[in-house]
């Protein structure tokens, strides 16, 4: 960041600069009461809506919308002591994390520790990446889904690398 003005006249270098800026996309987020704040930066692994029953319960909505990032692309900025994690005992990996003061969903690492799951609604600004899937879509079709994002009854093949 900070050197985007250099060599603007050269097309190949301009493309490189654009790519570097995208790689360095930095997003801030936090909870409703603002006690907890964090930052996460690109590249992001994926961005998707999940309509499964667990995500519906955890969010109180028709789906969760999560941005996934490598854990080394994430850090808490404030209020970490207010973050409460709940690992669903009956699930292999489902967890939810929230602010104990205001109840807002917050990012958490997967039990494998390999990914950070960032509830997109907790972001302060929109990522440049767009959602690429609605997964477990069949379990609740009553939500906002009148778009053309590809739909899957379960994890698509490309979900796990
Ligand atoms: Zn809060
Ligand atoms: Zn889900």
Image (tube, rainbow, N blue to C red):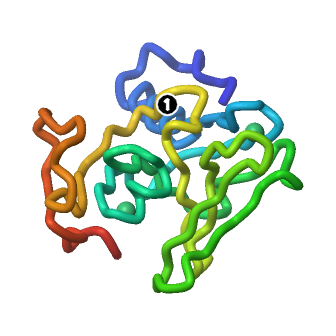
Residue 9 vs 45, above or below: the answer is: above
Residue 14 percent coordinates (x, y): 43, 25
Q: Measuring 55% from the left and 67% from the top, which residue is drawn there?
A: 115
Q: Ligand 2 is found in which quarter of the picture? A: bottom left
Give the position of the C terminus as an image quadrant.
bottom left
Residue 137 percent coordinates (x, y): 19, 57
Residue 105 percent coordinates (x, y): 60, 48
Residue 42 vs 15, above or below: the answer is: below
Residue 154 percent coordinates (x, y): 20, 70
Q: Nearer the viewer, residue 152 or 128?
A: 152
Give the position of the N terminus as an image quadrant.
top right
Q: Measuring 86% from the left and 45% from the top, which residue is drawn there?
A: 79
Q: Measuring 83% from the left and 37% from the top, which residue is drawn there?
A: 35
Residue 99 vs 29, above or below: the answer is: below
Residue 73 vs 122, above or below: the answer is: below
Label 1: which residue?
17
Q: Measuring 35% from the left and 23% from the top, which residue is drawn there?
A: 11
Q: Nearer the viewer, residue 80 or 68?
A: 80
Q: Is residue 127 left or right of residue 134?
A: right
Q: Nearer the viewer, residue 131 or 34?
A: 34
Where disc 1 sits, the SS reads helix
Does the residue tagged 1 have its C-beta within 8 Å of any atom of ligand 2?
no
Query: Quadrant location of residue 3?
Result: top right
């Amino acid at each position: 960041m900070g050197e985007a003005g250099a060599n603007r006249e050269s097309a190949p270098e301009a493309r490189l600069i654009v790519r570097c800026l995208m790689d360095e996309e930095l997003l801030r987020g936090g909870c409703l009461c603002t006690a907890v704040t964090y930052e996460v930066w690109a590249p992001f692994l994926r961005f998707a809506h999940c309509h499964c029953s667990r995500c519906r319960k955890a969010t109180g909505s028709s789906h969760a919308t999560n941005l996934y990032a490598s854990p080394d692309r994430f850090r808490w900025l404030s209020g970490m002591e207010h973050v409460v994690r709940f690992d669903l005992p009956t699930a292999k990996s489902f967890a939810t994390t929230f602010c104990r003061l205001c109840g807002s969903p917050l990012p958490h690492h997967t039990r494998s520790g390999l990914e950070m799951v960032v509830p997109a609604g907790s972001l302060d600004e929109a990522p440049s990446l767009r959602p690429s899937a609605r997964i477990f879509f069949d379990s609740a079709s009553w939500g906002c889904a009148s778009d053309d994002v590809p739909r899957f009854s379960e994890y698509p093949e490309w979900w796990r690398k």
